[in-house]
Structure formats: C-alpha cells, structure tokens
Amino acid sequence: MSAGRPLRIGFVAYRGNMQCGGQGIYLWFLARELARQGHAVDVWVGPPHPDPMPFAGHVERLPNQQFWAKWFLRERRGFLPSPNPLAVFSPLNFYELAASRLGFLPEPFAFSLRAFGSVASALGRGRRYDLIHDVQCLGYGLLGLRALGLPVVTTVHHPLSVDREASFGRDRTGSDRIGTMQFYPIGMQAFVARRLEAVLTSSGASLERIRRDFGVDRARLHMVGNGLDTGLYRPDPAVERSTTELLCVGRASDPNKGVRTLLAALARLPAEVRLTLVDDAGPGNPVRRWAREAGLADRLTLTGRVATEELVDLYRRAAIVVVPSRYEGFGLPAAEAMACGAPVVCSDAGALAEVVAAGEGVLVPRDDPEALAKALDTLLAQPEARARLAATARQGIVDTYSWPRVATRTVDVYRSVLEAKA
C-alpha cells in the first residue's frame, strides 16, 4: 500500500535529544528513513535538541526554559532566561515556571502551543503538509493544527499511565502520591489522543494499554513496531563473547525495569557470574545498596552513561543479555541485543514476548528470581544453545524491526488516514 506520490510530513516532538529517551531516537531515525524513501520531512522540536538532521528540509528548534528539570536538579545558576531574564514573564514561560513549581510537568502542553504557532506561521508563508506526525506530546495545541485542516497522527510508545503506576510504586508518603497524581498530564493526553486521526504504537501490548487507559477507539490504533538501526547493531565475529558476564540495560530507580529481581537471581548463580548494568554510576544509585545487602557488590559493574558504539560492544561481549522488566511498551534493549547476535533472557512482561518472538530468546515469568536464575544457569551451562540463539535471533529482528520496514508500515498508516479524509 505504500506506493504512491511522495508525502510532505511535519514532525513535532517536545524532546528531541537521542540521549534523553526513546522518543528522540525514534524521531531521528524515522525522519531519516522517510527522507531516504523520498518523502519530504520538516521538524519542529523542543530541547534537549536532536543531533543534526541534514535529511530534513527544515528543522525548527523551539524554545523551552526547562524549568521543571532545573527545579528537580536544584540548578539555581542559569535558572532565568538568558540573555533577557525578563523573558520569564512571557505567558508560556511564566506558565511553565509556575506549573513546575507546583509539581506539574508543563512541557507537553507548552510545547504543543509553541508548535501550533510555529506551524501555523509556516503555513501562512506558503508551506504545505499532507499531515503532521506528533511524537508522544499529545498537547492541546495539536487540536489547533487539526482545526487548520491538517490531519494529525501521533506515536505513543506506551501511555503515561504506565509511568504513573511505576511512580506510585516508588512513593512512600501521601505527599509523594499527591505529587505523582499532579505530575503526569494523563487527562490532557487521553483527551487529545481520542481526537486525532490515528495513534501509532510499537507493540500489541502498548496498543491494548492505550485503548484501555486512554479510551482510544480500536479502529484508530495501529501497531507499526519500533525501529532499530540494524546496520549499527550487528554482530562482530572478531569480538569474543564472555562465558560468565550478564548484561542489563535499565535504570535501577525505575521499578518497571526489574533490577532488584535480577540481583536476587544473580545471588542464586555461581560466584564467577558477574553483572554489568548500564545505569547511572553515581553513589546515589540504589542498586549499590541492594548489591551490598545481598553480598554482590564485587559482582556488579555500573557503566554510567555509555556512547552508542560502546553499548554495541557490550552487547557483543556479553554471555547473556537480561531484560527482567515488569513492563515494556517495546523493549529496545532486547531487540538491540538480538540484532547484535546476543543470547537474550527476558521476562514475559508487556511487549517483550512479541520482541522475542520476532527473533529468538528465552522467556521467564516476571518478578520470579528463582525462574530467572534457573534459565540463566541453564543457558550459561550450554554454549551450543547460546550459539544457536545468537545465530537465529538477528534475522528475525532485521525482518521485523529494521527502520525501512517500520517506515513502510508508518507510511501505510499515513496513506490510509489521507484516503479516509479524502
């Protein structure tokens, strides 16, 4: 269905940096692949801004003072706008300042209004788009773009209700719980999602959560998968795999990542088995305390933030990559590891079973350290089984999640939206 005239697509994304989460990676690679397929792409993006996007016709970096992050990190220096501190009193800046101070996340709403104004200005100067593709902002300004006659679709990797559940799991006081209720703009996002032409997502598990939690009509939901740069994430026969090193990519501070379950499993494995965790290496990381309490401090390595090339090497060296998550809307580390030819053991949570089914890996019940330890111990003792998994996993990931495949399925949704509108 993708055959047809090239399309003109305007992307809006409230955070664009590829080191700040999956939405920045998704924006950059999908826009690049659409341009490679002959479509015209313009981008409106908020900070932290993306890497250069030479494949885009126009990239507009919209301002944002990031007051919420400054409050959270207690950054008093450079708090007010520079070079003009009085700019804090402009309506959107002042709204973001006040909302941040009261414990709300103001970025999606404020960005959507800025994007609405900027896109409308571009239309006034003669630019034309077939549709607008929002990346997980879902602010009210998108409805303004629809009012101008533009079809708007959005990508939601998983609804914010999932993050709110995880936050409730960390909360210890009533005040914490009230803060969690305030922080996530779920009402706005659900309201907007129900009114857009289409909602794209990365897995069947996410699709069901969006339908249930946001109330989006099933006919407007489309599972197109998440993409992976399979040219970058690939095996290297010259890199020797360990026989005892486990690798996990995930934040210990996020209960959904299941790091405590992994540590409990590690305690049941032979002493020579070690864990490398790609996570914050600072002294405040709770995984350090958990490891000390379990007698595992000398078997844990924290990498801190790593460059993409270093992450690829970690995947290539690991005996097994472990994804013990309690929920994943997609499970990018599992797909990246399989693309690198690594044996993977995952919990059967969220979309991980779908990702594993695309390639090949081992699934265990979530939150079950005994089952996880048994699966890891069995696989560590079977080099032939690890080699078989490594040999077969990559091709399934290439066939299902390479960016050309994901971009083609995305364009199919675009065309169905445009045909319905016509």
Image (cartoon, rainbow, N blue to C red):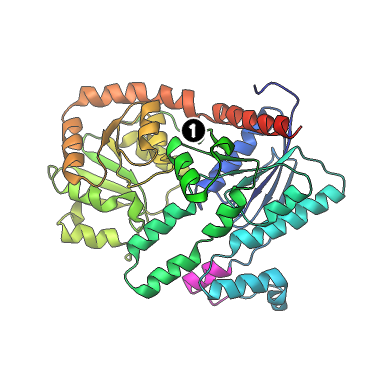
Position above or below: 51 against 405: below
Task: Please tell me whether mark 1 sits on a helix, a strand or a loop.
Answer: loop
**Residue 89: which quarter of the image?**
bottom right
Position of 264 relative to 185 (above/below): above
**In this rendering, does residue 226 appear at all?**
yes
The structure residue drawn at horizontal position 46% and vertical position 36%, both measured from the top left corner, is 203
Q: Position of residue 386 (x, y in %)?
A: 25, 27
Would you say 292 lies left or right of 121 here? Answer: left
Q: Tell me: residue 350, above or below residue 293.
A: above
Q: Nearer the viewer, residue 6 or 232?
A: 6
Q: Is residue 81 visible?
A: no
Residue span colored magenta: 67-77
Which residue lies most toward the right here?
125
Residue matched to label 1: 232
Between 418 and 48, the one lying in front of the other is 418
Query: Residue 72 location, x and y as percent?
Result: 48, 70
| Residues packed near mark 1 inside 10 Å, few (<14), some (14 to 19) or many (20 plus) | few
